[in-house]
Image (tube, rainbow, N blue to C red):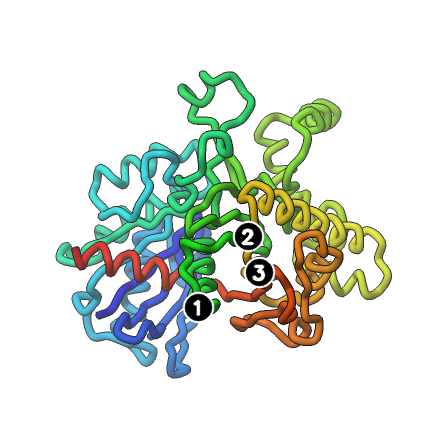
């Protein structure tokens, strides 16, 4: 059974076609620069590829090209789109409206679009892509939406509420929503399986570290708190995002720079983080290289990230009244042994003892990296959000 997984942005449309019999990826690609000029890059599991500049005025033309490359030409993997059992879409913001994977209807698309104020960069783009996909795909092929925020709907009120007047929650829906939920759900379940334990009996801190980073407390398989908040801006220092900042500092800087709210948002989301502190760039690899050359600002940005992750691990261990395992995932989490080692060093208070030899050689591979006598196990767990979306979609249509 074949499932097409789609992750649409405002100017991009990433996709994977999976064979769910063995959960293998048959093909994957990206239609980018939608609304600008357009380009598609497409690769198959057996090494064939297709790259071309295309006219993508809207997401509809991108979907039409996706269908073309999957079904025709030298990089085709199927003969007709009717061979696909279903399409699964990643949706960033489901707010309190969506707490589980849902079949796509016109009404569901409208509700997703209505939430665009809570995720202006993402949700309207998701709605555009969903409407485009409905135009292009055969009507007989069901489609499902999987929400990044759904996993965090198990957070208690005391964790997701802010100290603003309660009316702002009731009328404006201002609260912590959390993100990366699909990733945190996948890796925490994968860790429990690797440990040979029932996830219901585990207290896990999941560290999804990349250009965007979030830390989640997973107690018994459920999210009970997470570092990202009303938007993905909150939490730890990120590639271009500030992470947690005193709100008064925000209004102070806004006034001094004479920024509009939109300009201040852009400043905090796109010009801060690693980029703003280090002055080197937003990519951890560039920052790490600068650290090795003695760049003090680069070292400061790395030290800030490590320190903040440590604080979240300690806080979440307290919130869960215990800790069985810490996991690292995402681009930095899976591929930066130095960050993992520094986070886990001097964590004796929690009983964390990292195996520096095992840790040093691990990149993008499922592996335990703590010592045998460490009270808290430490693991690297590669994430696979596309696979989880495909699994959710298959489970839903199977009902």
Between 391 and 90, the one lying in front of the other is 391
Residue 373 is left or right of residue 322, and the answer is: right
Q: Quadrant of residue 53?
A: bottom left
Q: Quadrant of residue 302?
A: bottom right
Residue plotted at (75% across, 25% down):
256
Residue 365 is left or right of residue 295, and the answer is: left
Dot 1 or dot 2: first in sequence order is: 1
Q: Position of residue 155 (x, y in %)?
A: 44, 38
Residue plotted at (56% across, 42% down):
227
Residue 161 is left or right of residue 105, and the answer is: right
Q: Are marks 1 and 2 in contact (CB under 8 Å)?
A: no
- Mark 2 = which residue? 205
As drawn, the label of residue 352 is none
The answer to whether 344 is drawn above or below residue 99 in the figure is below
As drawn, the label of residue 196 is 1
- Mark 3 = which residue? 328
Callout 1 secondary element: loop
Residue 62 is left or right of residue 157, and the answer is: left
Residue plotted at (36% across, 60% down):
388
């Amino acid at each position: 059974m074949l499932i097409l997984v789609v992750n649409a942005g405002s100017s991009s449309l990433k996709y994977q076609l999976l064979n769910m019999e063995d959960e293998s990826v048959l093909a994957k690609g990206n239609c980018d620069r939608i609304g600008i000029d357009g380009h598609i890059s497409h690769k198959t599991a057996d090494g064939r590829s297709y790259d071309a500049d295309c006219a993508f005025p809207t997401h509809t033309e991108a979907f039409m090209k996706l269908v073309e490359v999957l079904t025709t030409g030298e990089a085709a993997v199927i003969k007709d789109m009717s061979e696909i059992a279903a399409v699964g879409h990643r949706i960033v913001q489901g707010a309190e409206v969506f707490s589980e994977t849902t079949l796509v209807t016109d009404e569901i698309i409208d509700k997703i679009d209505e939430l665009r104020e809570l995720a202006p960069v993402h949700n309207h783009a998701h709605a555009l892509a969903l409407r485009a996909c409905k135009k292009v795909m055969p009507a007989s092929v069901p489609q499902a939406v999987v929400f990044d925020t759904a996993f965090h709907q198990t957070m208690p009120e005391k964790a997701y509420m802010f100290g603003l007047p309660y009316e702002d929650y009731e009328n404006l829906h201002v609260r912590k929503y959390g993100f990366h939920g699909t990733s945190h759900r996948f890796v925490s379940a994968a860790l429990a399986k690797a440990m040979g334990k029932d996830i219901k009996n585990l207290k896990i801190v999941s560290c999804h570290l990349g250009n965007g980073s979030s830390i989640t407390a997973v107690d018994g398989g459920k999210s009970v708190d997470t570092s990202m908040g009303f938007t993905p801006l909150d939490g730890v220092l990120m590639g271009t995002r500030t992470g947690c900042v005193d709100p008064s500092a925000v209004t102070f800087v806004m006034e001094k720079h004479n920024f509009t709210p939109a300009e201040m948002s852009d400043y905090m989301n796109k010009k801060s983080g690693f980029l703003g502190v280090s002055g080197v760039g937003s990519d951890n690899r560039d920052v790490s290289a600068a650290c090795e050359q003695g760049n003090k600002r680069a070292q400061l940005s790395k030290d800030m990230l490590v320190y903040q992750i440590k604080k979240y691990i300690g806080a979440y261990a307290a919130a869960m009244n215990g800790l069985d395992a810490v996991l690292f995932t995402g681009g930095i989490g899976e591929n930066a042994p130095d960050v993992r080692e520094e986070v886990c060093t001097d964590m004796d208070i929690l009983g964390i003892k990292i195996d520096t030899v095992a840790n040093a050689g691990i990149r993008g591979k499922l592996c335990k990296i703590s010592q045998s006598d460490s009270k808290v196990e430490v693991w690297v767990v590669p994430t696979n959000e596309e696979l989880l979306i495909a699994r959710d979609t298959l489970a839903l249509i199977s009902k």
